[in-house]
Amino acid sequence: MLALSDASRYFLYRRAADMRKSFYSLASIVQQEMQGNALSGDIFIFLSRRRNQIKLLRWEKDGYAIYCKRLEEGNYELPMQQDETSCLISRQQLLLILEGISLRQIKYRKRYSHQRGICE
């Protein structure tokens, strides 16, 4: 079961990922291209070239878990384009992406946030 909490960090891989890749290949992308630690317990998000498929990779104490979804219609929206290979997003942004809500039209009201470096 997929559980998203504020205690987790969510890293979005901004390049297209080959959806045929599985646990170790995605973990390799995390370490080599995203300069992350796949064993950290953070959630790493990958999208297909057409952005109609998404995979979330997470280490859960005793092994990797993957959440995978393919849309029958439409595609997932990425946060505003940046030149980075990956970026940190919030749990709320991930939920909006998964629900198909346009990130460009969301207006966030001012709140204190301890997190820095979140994609917009």
Image (cartoon, rainbow, N blue to C red):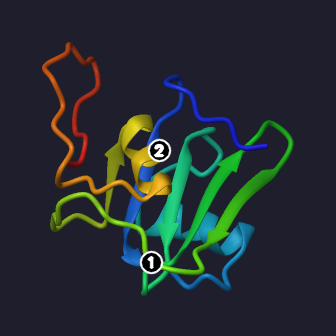
Would residue 28 be found to the left or right of residue 101 on screen? right
Residue 13 x %, y %:
41, 64
Kindly report which numbered mark, 1 or 2, lies closer to the viewer in this rendering. Answer: 1
**101 over 14 or under it: above or below:** above
How many discs appear?
2
Would you say the residues marked 1 and 2 are in contact, meaning their CB atoms lie under 8 Å apart? no
Report the disc number at residue 74.
1
Residue 41 x %, y %:
63, 38
Residue type (three-letter) at the residue carrying disc 2: Leu
x 50%, y 78%: residue: 52
x 18%, y 31%: residue: 108
Q: Is residue 35 visible?
A: no
Q: Which residue is mark 2?
A: 95
Q: Give whichever of 71, 115 is nearer the camera.
A: 71
Residue 112 x %, y %:
20, 13
Q: Residue furthest top?
A: 112
Q: Is residue 85 visible?
A: yes
**103 over 31 or under it: above or below:** above
**42 over 116 or under it: above or below:** below
**Nearer-N-terminus badge (1/2):** 1
x 47%, y 36%: residue: 9
Task: Categorize mark 2 by other alpha carbons within 10 Å: few (<14), some (14-19), many (20+).
Answer: few
Q: Give whichever of 93, 27 is nearer the camera.
A: 93
Residue 53 x %, y %:
56, 75
In space, the residues marked 1 and 2 are separated at their CA atoms by: 16 Å
- For the N terminus, the image quarter is top right
Report the disc number at residue 13.
none
Q: Secondary structure at mark 2?
A: helix
**114 over 44 or under it: above or below:** above
Would residue 9 be found to the left or right of residue 71 on screen? left
Residue type (three-letter) at the residue carrying disc 1: Gly
